[in-house]
Image (cartoon, helix red, strand yellow):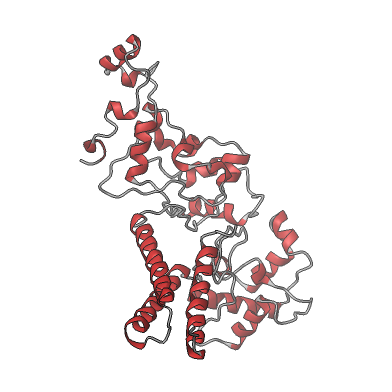
Amino acid sequence: MSYCSGNEKINTRFYLSVLVLALLIFLLNNGIFGQDLIVGHNKEAVKHRGPESKESMIGERMFYGLVKLENGRLNCEGCHSLATTPKVNWNPSAYDLSVWMEGKTTSDLKKAFDSPSSDLMETSHKNAKLNDDESKKIMAYLVKVKENGQVFHKDFPIKLLLFFIFGLLMALALVDLIFTKKIKYKVVHVLVLIIGLAFHMQMAMVEATNLGRTKDYAPDQPIKFSHKVHAGDNKIDCKYCHTGVFDSKSAGIPSANLCINCHNVVRNGRNSGKYEITKIHDAIDTKKPIEWIRVHKLPDHVYFNHAQHVVAGKVECATCHGKVETMDIMAQYSDLSMGWCVNCHRQTKVNFEGNDYYKSYVKLHDDLKSGKIKQVTVEQVGGLDCMKCHY
């Protein structure tokens, strides 16, 4: 009977420990145990680099609630974070405040504290007071924030880390298997190589499949617009704002002129107060368009027509865009891949009755009447013809 030496036991335990750790991270990250591992530097205190005045340094400490003021402490960063967040934060960020403060004086900042312009601000700033010196220092810090720009939330690259961990383990296993031979049992090497290769292949397949696709893409918009409030709570029809669906390829993004139809009256948002709605009025006054960020975009070589689907096909918006009425932040619901479109065309039934668009399909009408076919799908009216989408 043979026994492992002390070094062999240590080496074996090392390999197995790292392997188990990598597997545990992988399982947690993929939600196997019921929740995703969310790693990021959300709302971290970010230190600005570069020369700073004494006033801006003190103002930063005041902003983070590290310095006691004349009337107690304020933790402005708790609501007005410097970094963007993965979830919607209805309060203006520190950068938003720095933009708003441009061209304003310390008295304007004091006025904002002393006379809140909305119910939301009144609740948040209850008992908050600033004297002239404190206002000056916080303004100096906000000038520094404006110069440095906003910090964007970035998730920790957990998959990339796992890729290198498994790669390192496989390299060590191969070296020990061929040259050093410190671990007696070859099954350990084989196990490391099989699991490592399986992970690398799975990652390569997933990343290759997702190349160029932007499912779940949800960018920060210049105005914190909630579809949940507008389409969900207030029951505004999608087509009221996105009028292009009736006669255009694109659904279109509403202009500030359309937004102002309602927001001439509604000046106080339930979540954001007056701050975000004021941006609409500023766009009207300055005649500068709101630079919305497009969420859904197909490749340039793909032709898609909203009018064709919505008017002729009677397709509901939620079919492609999901339950928009539940989204505070608009996100891409479908992957918009070619396979997804083809499957939809194969499965979707075409309603010929009362739809003048399909009058020219005489043979299909005759086949339906005679009972030769029971239904017509998009595929049967040319929905899988390559030239329909690529020409």
* Residue 212 seen in render: no
* Residue 312 screen position, x and y as percent: 37, 27
Front residue of 241/340: it is 340
Position of the C terminus by quadrant = top left
* Residue 355 seen in render: yes
* Residue 292 screen position, x and y as percent: 45, 53
* Residue 254 screen position, x and y as percent: 46, 43
* Residue 278 screen position, x and y as percent: 58, 54
The answer to whether residue 7 is left or right of residue 87 is left
Residue drawn at (34%, 18%), measured in percent from left and top?
Answer: 356
Residue drawn at (65%, 81%), measured in percent from left and top?
Answer: 61
Residue located farthest toward the bottom when viewing the structure as drawn: 6
287 shown above or below 127: above
The answer to whether residue 184 is left or right of residue 387 is right
Which of the 4 quarters of the picture holds residue 139?
Answer: bottom right
The answer to whether residue 110 is left or right of residue 225 is right
Residue located farthest toward the front when viewing the structure as drawn: 1
Residue drawn at (41%, 65%), measured in percent from left and top?
Answer: 199
Front residue of 231/171: it is 171
Front residue of 36/69: it is 36
Which of the 4 quarters of the picture holds residue 28?
Answer: bottom right
6 shown above or below 63: below
Which of the 4 quarters of the picture holds residue 263?
Answer: top right
Please give the count of numbered marks on the rendered protein: 0
Residue drawn at (66%, 76%), measured in percent from left and top?
Answer: 64
